[in-house]
């Protein structure tokens, strides 16, 4: 007689989905802001984020609300641990595993499909829970995965808050102010930044390889309006909150660690959704 494991798998999925809310939708729909608000409403909590720079940004927002003694930051580069913090902000990989907290949030769960980082995001989504509330946040495209792995979870869909307009090809030096230009190698980022500085007067550079202090300073340079152009890798599409009106791609190809290939629609959408009003692949 063949052996079936479907009933056990269903019970496991239902158990994992108990008391979990999945907030799904594109970037720029307030998912991370919601997670911050919900965490600070609890007695304790932890939020796992996909980028060190985003973790620092969320940490700063929490500190502004509740003070530095209440918030810890843990990433691969930075560790800020007060004596008895109530709230923890970390990258998903660095989420402390021994914390018993009232609230847990895991951001950008669609990275469960990533070849290198996917196992970590999947593990956190399946196994990290808050005593009182758990949020998982991600793109609307992961709804079938959530329904299968977290059966019974409450799924909330969020619409995009602004409209994207495709404006066609443009020369880099003719891009409007408040533009982000996305490139896919450090050499290309620096070359474009130098071109913009020569012809338009100023540009900020954001890449994962920069030190935390340098990255933070570059983001502030752009956000403050001291420069009107941001040159970055596609990491800016992973939830980093920037005042961008126009996004341009320097190329539609990238090296993914294994091969050079065209960007897929999900990657294009993830980055374009960081812009405010219009996006133009260059």
Image (cartoon, helix red, strand yellow):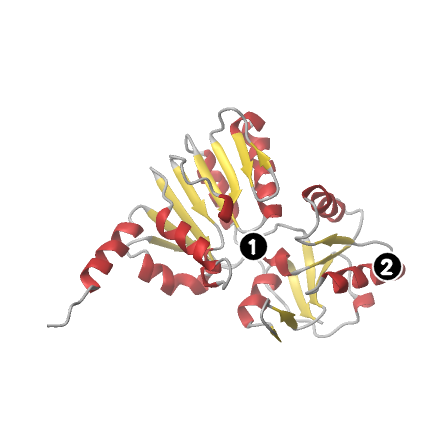
Could you tell me which residue is drawn at 80 percent across and 47 percent down?
226
Residue 251 to residue 66: above or below: below
Residue 260: x %, y % from top left: 63, 74
Q: Is residue 180 visible?
A: yes
Quarter placement of the C terminus: bottom right
Residue picked out by circle 1: 28
Q: Earlier in the sequence, mark 2 or mark 1?
A: 1
Could you tell me which residue is drawn at 58 percent across and 50 percent down?
51
Q: Which mark is residue 200?
A: 2
Q: Tell which of 68 and 94 is nearer to you.
A: 94
Residue 60 to residue 183: above or below: above
Residue 258 is left or right of residue 228, and the answer is left
Q: Is residue 157 visible?
A: no
Residue 214: x %, y % from top left: 73, 44
User: How much space separates mark 2 and mark 1, taking CA atoms?
Assistant: 28 Å
Residue 245, by quadrant, is bottom right
């Amino acid at each position: 007689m063949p052996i079936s494991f479907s009933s056990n798998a269903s019970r496991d999925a239902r158990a994992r989905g108990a008391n979990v809310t999945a907030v799904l939708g594109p970037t720029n729909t307030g998912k991370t802001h919601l997670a911050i608000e919900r965490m600070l409403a609890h007695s304790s909590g932890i939020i796992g984020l996909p980028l060190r720079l985003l973790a620092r940004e969320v940490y700063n927002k929490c500190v502004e609300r509740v003070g530095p003694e209440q918030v810890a930051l843990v990433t691969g580069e930075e560790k800020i641990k007060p004596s008895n913090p109530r709230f923890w902000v970390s990258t998903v990989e660095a989420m402390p595993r021994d914390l018993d907290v009232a609230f847990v949030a895991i951001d950008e769960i669609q990275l469960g499909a990533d070849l290198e980082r996917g196992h970590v995001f999947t593990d956190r989504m399946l196994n990290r829970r808050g005593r009182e509330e758990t949020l998982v946040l991600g793109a609307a495209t992961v709804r079938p995965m959530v329904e299968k792995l977290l059966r019974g979870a409450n799924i909330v869909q969020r619409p995009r808050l602004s409209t994207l307009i495709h404006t066609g090809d443009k020369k880099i030096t003719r891009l409007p102010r408040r533009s982000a230009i996305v490139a896919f190698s450090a050499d290309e980022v620096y070359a474009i930044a130098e071109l913009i500085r020569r012809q338009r007067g100023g540009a900020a550079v954001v890449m994962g390889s920069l030190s935390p202090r340098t990255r933070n300073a570059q983001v502030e340079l752009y956000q403050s309006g001291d420069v009107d152009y941001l040159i970055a890798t596609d990491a800016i599409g992973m939830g980093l909150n920037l005042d961008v009106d126009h996004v341009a791609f320097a190329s539609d190809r990238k090296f993914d660690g294994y091969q050079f290939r065209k960007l897929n629609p999900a990657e294009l959408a993830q980055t374009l959704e960081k812009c405010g009003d219009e996006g133009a692949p260059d």
